Image (spheres, rainbow, N blue to C red):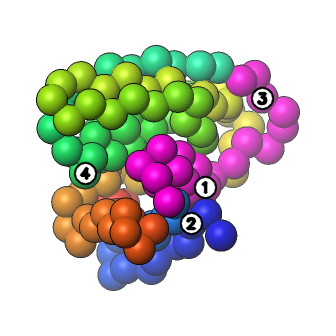
Amino acid sequence: MKFEVLEHTGDVGLKFYGKTYQELLGNAVSGTADLIGKPIDKCRRVRKTISLGSTNFEDLLLQVLSKVVFSFEVDEILIDSVETFEFRKNGVSDVVLSGCRTGKNFQYHYVLKAPTYYRLEINLEQGYGIVIFDI
C-alpha cells in the first residue's frame, strides 16, 4: 500500500508510506492526485521541473503538494508522480514531477485548497507520513 485516505471533519487527510524521502514524496504526490480525482479519457503526459527552497523535508513536502494542487487548478495538469528528487538540507531542492494534462474530461473526488501543517508528521524510521488538506 502506498497511501490511504484519512477522513477528517471538514478536511481530508492522507497517510503515505515509504522507506526513503523519495518514496514518501512520490507516494504523497500520488495520493494527492488520487484525492483530486482522475481523468476520464486518455491524457497527454507532461513534465514539470521545480526548484524549491527549504531547510527540512516537511517544508519541502508541503511546497511540492501545494504545487500539485496549484498545477491542477491553474494549468489543468494532474501531477501524479515524482520522476527525480534531490533534497539538500542547506538550500534549494530540485524536483521533476510528471502528470496528465486533464482538460475538461475529469472526474473529481475532492476539491483541495491546500496542504496544512496541522497534524503534519513524517516518520522515516517507521516509514510513513501524514498530511491534512483544507477542502
Q: Residue at position x 20%, y 67% from top? A: 118
Total numbered badges shown on the rendered structure: 4
- The amino acid type of the residue labelled 4 equals Glu
Q: Helix or strand or loop: what does disc 3 sit on?
A: loop
Quarter of the image where the C terminus is located: bottom left
Residue 59 x/y as whole percent:
22, 45
The first of marks 1 and 4 along the sequence is 1
Q: Is residue 102 left or right of residue 113?
A: right
Q: Helix or strand or loop: what does disc 1 sit on?
A: helix
**Label 1: how many residues lie within 10 Å, few (<14), some (14-19) or many (20+)?**
some
Residue 70 x/y as whole percent:
39, 34
* Location of mark 1 (residue): 34
Q: Is residue 17 visible?
A: yes
In reply to whether residue 41 is colored magenta, the answer given is yes
Label 1–label 2 contact, CB within 8 A: yes
* Location of mark 3 (residue): 43
The first of marks 1 and 3 along the sequence is 1
Alpha-carbon span between mark 2 and mark 4: 17 Å
Residue 61 x/y as whole percent:
33, 46
For the record, the magenta segment spans 19-45
Alpha-carbon span between mark 1 and mark 2: 10 Å
Q: Residue at position x 58%, y 30% from top? A: 83
Alpha-carbon span between mark 1 and mark 3: 15 Å
The first of marks 1 and 2 along the sequence is 2
Q: Which circle marks residue 58 in the picture?
A: 4
Alpha-carbon span between mark 4 and mark 3: 31 Å
In the rendered view, would you say 82 is above or below 116?
above
- The amino acid type of the residue labelled 2 equals Phe
**Label 4: how many residues lie within 10 Å, few (<14), some (14-19) or many (20+)?**
some
Alpha-carbon span between mark 1 and mark 4: 21 Å
